Amino acid sequence: MAREEIRDGDCLLAIVIRGQDWKDGLDFISSEQDFQQVGTWSYNKGKALQAHRHLTTPRTAQWTQEVVYLKQGRLRADIYSTEKRLVASVQLIAGDTIDTIK
């Protein structure tokens, strides 16, 4: 899956996930270092997943994160630096997701 990163220098501000890029099966877009685990599940009807549990991973959040999934329509997301300077404007369409980091 395509992972479009929006950065201000070394600072990761957001990740854009395009809906049309979903792969079959389980696909994680986030890295192990990311605060929030983001991925897609694309299976055929009737697929049964094995029971599992998530690993204990202590984390400290400095910023409130937000995930937006666009079900219908279009959206322009303006991404700003921590100094409130416009870094990027991203056009999202139905099926796209944006994960804002900072």
Image (spheres, grey):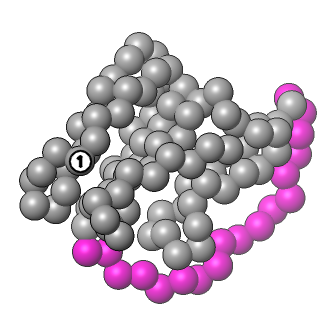
Q: Is residue 76 left or right of residue 27?
A: left
Element class at badge 1: strand
Q: Is residue 63 left or right of residue 14?
A: left
Q: Is residue 18 left or right of residue 7?
A: right
Relative to 12, residue 4 above or below = above
| Picture quarter with the C terminus | bottom left
Which residue type does callout 1 highlight? Val
Q: What residue span does the magenta drawing correspond to?
A: 45-62
Question: How many numbered badges does the structure rendering display?
Answer: 1
Q: Quadrant of residue 43?
A: top right
Residue 24 image offset from top left, x and y in percent: 82, 39
**Which residue is rendered at x = 62% and y = 44% of the image?**
2
- Which residue is labeled 1 in the image? 87
**Residue extending furthest toward the top:** 73
**Which residue is rendered at x = 70% and y = 71% of the image?**
53
| Picture quarter with the N terminus | top right
Task: Say if residue 101 shows up in the picture.
Answer: no
Task: Say if residue 88 shows up in the picture.
Answer: yes
**Which residue is rendered at x = 16% and y = 62% of the image?**
82
Q: Residues within 10 Å of mark 1 (few under 14, many from 20)?
A: some
Q: Please tell me whether residue 48 belongs to the stretch shown in magenta.
A: yes
Camera-side residue of 16 and 72: 16
Residue 97 image offset from top left, x and y in percent: 48, 37
**Which residue is rendered at x = 31% and y = 65% of the image?**
9
